[in-house]
Amino acid sequence: MPIGKISLFLVAIFMVFCLSSAVAETPSGVIEDGVRVVKVKAFKYGYEPDPIIVKRGEKVRLEVTSTDATHGFAVKEFRINATLPAKKTVPINFSADKAGTFTIRCIVFCGSGHFGMQGKLKVIDSSMHGY
Ligand SMILES: [Cu+2]
């Protein structure tokens, strides 16, 4: 391949890479009355969506539904510590006042996979991402 074509090829790969990372950083859920509302499912043994993505500075309401057993939803950095009864939806409100990737943990023993039941909450710094 001539040099020109190779560099075009590399630019194309780079653009695809940028696009896919931009998609990965799209916040979850919708804005309702100034609050980011995200519907979340908890199940054996994980959470969906994973990661949950919100923007720093947003008020957030997670509407978390356990689809099977009783689970927990805890993020210590935001003092979130909720129990999710089976087949119920629990609202969890918090202010996303710090950026970073935080671990969501199940705090209710729910079976053999309990100790591996984790999810991620990602708070993106919107100034860094241009939206
Ligand atoms: Cu669990």
Image: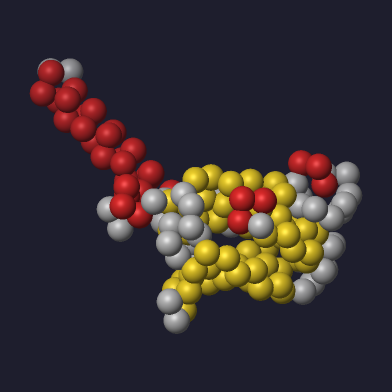
Where is residue 104? Give x, y as percent.
Answer: 66, 50
Is residue 88 or residue 8 the one in the foreground? 88
Closest to the observer, 124 or 112: 124
Q: Is residue 43 above or below residue 38?
A: above
Q: Is 10 situated left or right of 64 in this image?
A: left
For the point 77% across and 74% down, which residue is it?
Answer: 88
Q: Residue at x 74, y 63 (%)?
A: 82
Residue 46, visible in the rendered structure: no
* Residue 130 appears left or right of 106: left
Please provide percent x and percent y for residue 76.
Answer: 67, 51
Q: Quadrant of the N terminus?
A: top left
- Residue 81: which quarter of the image? bottom right
Q: Is residue 20 visible?
A: yes
Which residue sits at x=88%, y=44%? Answer: 112
Apparent side of residue 44 relative to residue 48 in the rendered image (left or right): right
128 vs 131: above or below: above
Task: Give the total number of marks visible in the rendering.
Answer: 0
| Residue 91: quadrant of the picture | bottom right
45 is higher (above) or lower (below) than 69: above
User: What residue lies at 76% left-to-right and 52% top-to-bottom?
Assistant: 106
| Quarter placement of the C terminus | bottom left
